Image: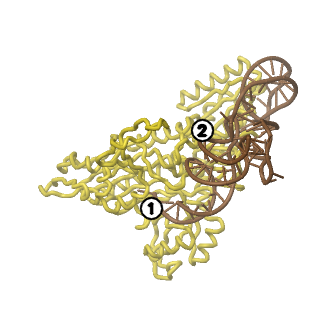
Amino acid sequence: MAKEITSRSEDYSQWYNDIVRKAGMADHSAVRGCMVIKPHGFAIWEKMQQQLDRMFKDTGHVNAYFPLFIPKSFLSKEAEHVEGFAKECAVVTHHRLMNAPDGSGVVVDPTAKLEEELIVRPTSETIIWNTYRDWIQSYRDLPLLINQWANVVRWEMRTRLFLRTAEFLWQEGHTAHASREEAIEETRLILDVYASFAEEYMAMPVIKGVKTANERFAGAEDTYCIEALMQDGKALQAGTSHFLGQNFARAFDVNFLNKENQQELVWATSWGVSTRLIGGLIMTHSDDDGLVLPPKLAPTQVVIVPIPKPAPEIDDAAQTLMKALRAQGISVKYDNDETKRPGFKFAEHEMQGVPVRVGIGMRDLEQGQLEIARRDTKEKSFVPKDGAPAYIANLLDEIQENLLQRAKAYRGENTRTANTIEEFETILDGPGGFVSAHWDGTSETELAIKERTKATIRCIPLDNPLEQGTCILTGKPSTQRVLFARAY
RNA sequence: CGGGGUGUGGCGCAGCCCGGUAGCGCGCUACGUUCGGGACGUAGAGGCCGGAGGUUCAAAUCCUCUCACCCCGACCA
């Protein structure tokens, strides 16, 4: 009714926008391309942060914080890096405002021009490696395993809430190592952390892979990624982990004395995931009734809705259940707002994606049962009151698992192989999804395929089997299939 | 940045072509009846029509500029 959302079949983009707005996740702000993350959206981000942070700490990383501003000269020290980011940087040129002489408001004070302009970080490699130079002298200072939670700014032409905004929140890890092997190992370790976070917490299956040269991070030797498939058949890059080789060490002159008492350049990695994950979460699970959240990331896992008229027995039953659930570490909310009717609450909590809803009315209590509804399948069951806490704990696990299996099944059904460019195009113009196809390994061919079909190579999967074949575009020999898709 | 579209109470829209000082639905407030899937009745509150300038006796309506958002494209780790 009042909050109805566009159906996915009618207009997927509009459906996405409706979900973000009507589930109370985010709004557009007064600033172009920037969003206001509302409490419900931010609570989900906090859940993601908590878990990721724990995983980073468990793998030996520590948090630190580097400045928002980067001297312009730093950015140009690594040639490919600056080329990659120069087109989308916000620049600070002055440090003072003054009243306009004509009284029309405040204007930039022309006498307050900065000697060196500052860039609002699009990513922090440069300022961090400039700092690492002072921190690293010897192999004993390595490895340096640092993460920071921060905001960054990339002046995007076209923005979508969560998926691509001019300012976004993320974490960026920046590590320094004594050997190439160790740095590569770190890059892969983090990729595994990201993949298990995506699957175990977001219930979003991902493919681990390596990017082609075209899609590589500006300044990296190799970019590893996790790629997910959204409900509309488009791919989403959900996280990246870069092996930076010695590029940044060379650019910022970061050397260490190795065990043989020789100066050597430090080996680097960087890796990040952002609030974009929230967009991925939405487009993996949600439906035409609103958001669907995996229990492990739901700010509220269970909501209890009393069916009026309010009675002390109902309140008692709700309190007892809440206590039992909280004792199991389950987050629960009792929605006893008397100004709203139950049907309205049902719809509202479905919109917000609460995984489990418990309805308690006198009729139920007389029969010693509770009505328990799950968000993922919309099924309702009546469960004996005493068994409810255990039932719900189990149900949350089941929902988590069901969401993952459902998403995996979808991805399985929407991953196809193509052996000719015609087959390739038929798939993309039809159902979409991932297309596994042979490619001759050149950037020219990759770009030509992109030009013709709008699809890009999402990655070369890590566990990719070798297979003789011929490139779908050029017919040249190929040793393995790579994963193509149209992407966000 | 190019093409197209839209900005009118909190939200969704009509009115604009053929200028005359704003209307509908939802939501909101109060009271009552209700309450097991987005309740109903009655009475109310709320908008200088995105912003600036211009034309005119008169502008939501016509003109110019500007800002924001949406779609497509270009671009984008």
- Residue visible at 33% across and 42% down? A111
| Rendered location of residue A316, percent (x, y) | 67, 19
Q: What residue type is labelled 2?
A: Asn
Q: Mark 2 points at which residue?
A: A394
Badge number at residue A332: none
Q: Mark 1 points at which residue?
A: A209
Dot 2: chain letter: A
Tell which of B13 and A448 is nearer to you.
Answer: B13
Q: Quadrant of the N terminus of chain A?
A: top right
Q: What residue type is labelled 1?
A: Gly
Residue A334, by quadrant, is top right
Q: Which color was chain A given?
A: yellow
Whether labels 1 and 2 belong to a single chain: the reply is yes
| Rendered location of residue A318, percent (x, y) | 66, 24
Q: Say which of marks 1 and 2 sits in front.
A: 1
Q: Which color was chain B given?
A: brown
How far apart are labels 1 and 2 at the CA level?
34 Å
Q: Which of marks 1 and 2 is nearer the N terminus?
A: 1
Dot 1: chain letter: A
| Rendered location of residue A264, percent (x, y) | 18, 58
- Residue visible at 39% across and 57% down? A86
| One can see residue A98 in this view | yes
Q: How many labels does the image show?
A: 2
